[in-house]
């Protein structure tokens, strides 16, 4: 079994477990179930769409992944992980400006995601915005001081800043 197929099957099983685990929990009172029932279909659909997007991403179909992420975000725009995954799909298509926008949306929801600050920095560095990239890598390192990728990226961007200012 290929790794991609394994990831797709695992993701689908996870969705089934999450959906079935929430619906068949007999220990939850009827009143609680009725209070949560109106939002359950939208959240469930958003999770399903996100999972479909992730599966498309794993298969290398980034444009389809973005489409699924857009649909998921239309139902649940507060899911930071969907914004992150959408940003990663945009990065895979070299659409760095759109990626930065997605990463910014994720960080507006959860500002303590070191990996997202790092990804944002990579996108900004690709765009030539070395100062913004430096700030993003430094923020990632404030959150996770041992984050070696962020430290490596910070070192690269500092060399770029130094080379840019030295050639003026």
Image (tube, rainbow, N blue to C red):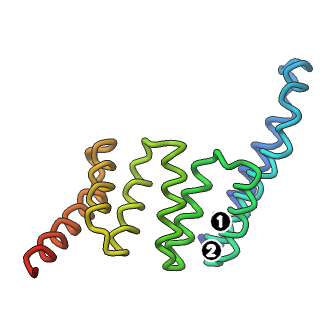
What secondary structure is marked by label 2? loop
Query: Of all residues shown, which one is farthest toward the left?
Result: 166
Determine which of the numbered discs, if any, sits on residue 6 in the image: 1
Question: At which x and y percent is residue 120?
Answer: 41, 61
Would residue 116 be found to the left or right of residue 132 on screen?
Answer: right
Question: At which x and y percent is residue 74?
Answer: 74, 55
Q: What residue do we see at 90% from left, 18% from top?
A: 31
1 and 2 marks in contact (CB < 8 Å): yes
Quadrant of the rendered image containing residue 59 = bottom right
Relative vertical location of residue 28 with respect to residue 77 in this rendering, above or below: above
Q: Residue 139 or 1: which is nearer the viewer?
A: 139
Quadrant of the rendered image containing residue 18 = top right
Relative vertical location of residue 108 with respect to residue 37 in this rendering, above or below: below
Q: What residue do we see at 35% from left, 62% from top?
A: 121
Q: What residue do we see at 51% from left, 76% from top?
A: 95
- Please tell me how crowded label 1 is: few (under 14), some (14-19), or many (20+) other residues with Cα within 10 Å: few
Q: What residue do we see at 55% from left, 72% from top?
A: 90
Which residue was labeled with disc 2? Answer: 2
- Please tell me how crowded label 2 is: few (under 14), some (14-19), or many (20+) other residues with Cα within 10 Å: few
Q: Residue 98 or 80: which is nearer the viewer?
A: 98
Q: Residue 12 or 1: which is nearer the viewer?
A: 12
Quadrant (top left/top right/bottom left/bottom right) for the N terminus:
bottom right
Quadrant (top left/top right/bottom left/bottom right) for the C terminus:
bottom left
Would residue 63 be found to the left or right of residue 27 on screen?
Answer: left
């Amino acid at each position: 079994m290929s790794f991609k197929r394994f990831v797709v099957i695992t993701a689908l099983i996870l969705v089934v477990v999450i959906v079935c685990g929430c619906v068949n929990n007999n220990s939850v009172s009827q009143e609680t179930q009725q209070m949560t029932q109106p939002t359950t279909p939208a959240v469930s659909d958003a999770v399903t769409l996100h999972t479909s997007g992730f599966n498309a991403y794993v298969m290398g179909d980034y444009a389809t992944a973005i489409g699924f992420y857009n649909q998921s975000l239309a139902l649940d725009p507060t899911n930071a992980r969907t914004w992150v995954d959408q940003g990663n799909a945009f990065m895979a298509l070299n659409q760095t400006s759109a990626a930065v926008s997605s990463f910014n949306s994720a960080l507006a929801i959860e500002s303590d995601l070191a990996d997202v600050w790092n990804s944002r920095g990579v996108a900004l560095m690709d765009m030539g915005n070395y100062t913004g990239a430096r700030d993003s890598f430094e923020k990632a390192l404030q959150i996770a001081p041992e984050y070696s990728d962020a430290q490596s990226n910070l070192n690269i961007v500092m060399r770029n800043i130094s080379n840019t200012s030295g050639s003026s």
